[in-house]
Amino acid sequence: MSFFEGGKVITMIKPIINTTIKASSQNYTKCNSRKIKYIIIHSTGHVATTKNYALALKNNKCNASFHYIIGDKEIYRCIEYNNIAWHIVNPNNTYKIKMVQPKNSNSIGIEMSKLNSNTGKVDETTIKLTGQLVRYLMYLLDIPPNRILRHYDVLSKPCPTGFLTQEKWNKLKLKLLIPHTTIKNAQNYNCIAKVICDNKLNVRNNRPINNKLGKKVDTIENNTFVKLGYVYDNWSSIFYLKNNKILNGFVNINYPKIMGASISLCIY
């Protein structure tokens, strides 16, 4: 599927974006053109309907704002991405500045909403929709993986809720950057796993054929997070981040062990 947007032909599936709720012009800075370099991930931190957050930007004067908010199986665009939302805010210098390059003027702010009322965590449907939007914007605006950041990477503000440790953020980032695919009778597909090995793990270009190992194409470090593809005959395709690129290959699931003793410990 191809479509034309922002002067560029996009050859991927565009997520369904609800544009019916537009923020009041008093809640963002109008801008005809700007260079967008970063996508900043936030979470609302509260259990409330996503639509109400969007309506708040429409009906009230707010000190902070966002381009997109996602939850309740919806992606709302409240501010067009060529305009400047106020999503990196630091009132009275409350928070420590950790990165100076990302600013409101060169970034897009995405809020994840709809926290689970029992766990206080962002639900998986919201994460999948956020991933669709992030990948679409990366492709449209030529934003590389290393410029997909948390609010917490820029300021010491604890946002997005539930993803403050580097380990939890690494897992989430893999989910956002690599599409979720459904394969029948493949329960381990899309699992986020952690490679545990003595030093480095060899990545092959294929599963063994006629008992001959595939060609070694890369190595990955101990404790690297990977996203599992189809698991067959003790080998799995994997996707992983390295040198600012999304790479894929094949690894043996028995040695080294992934996520402890069994790959059945899955996120999805």
Image: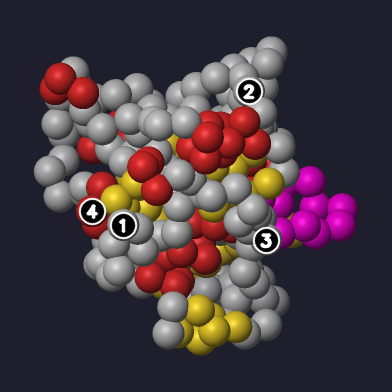
Near mark 2 (Cα within 10 A), the count class, few <14, some 14-19 or many ≥20, is: some
Residue 196 in view: no
Tag 2: residue type?
Answer: Ala
Tag 4 or tag 2, which sits nearer the N-term?
2
Q: CA distance from mark 2 to mark 4?
A: 28 Å
Select label 4 or label 1 by which is in front: 1
Q: Please give the residue where the numbered disc 1 appears in the rendered image.
A: 30
Lateral position of residue 172 relative to residue 64, left or right: right
Of the pair 152 and 209, the residue shown nearer to us: 152
Q: Are marks 3 and 4 in contact (CB under 8 Å)?
A: no
Lateral position of residue 210 relative to residue 45, left or right: right
Q: Residue at x 30, y 69 (%)?
A: 32
Magenta part of the protein: which range?
181-194
Q: Please give the residue where the numbered disc 3 appears in the rendered image.
A: 16
Task: Give the x, y percent position of residue 257.
Answer: 55, 39
Tag 3: residue type?
Answer: Ile
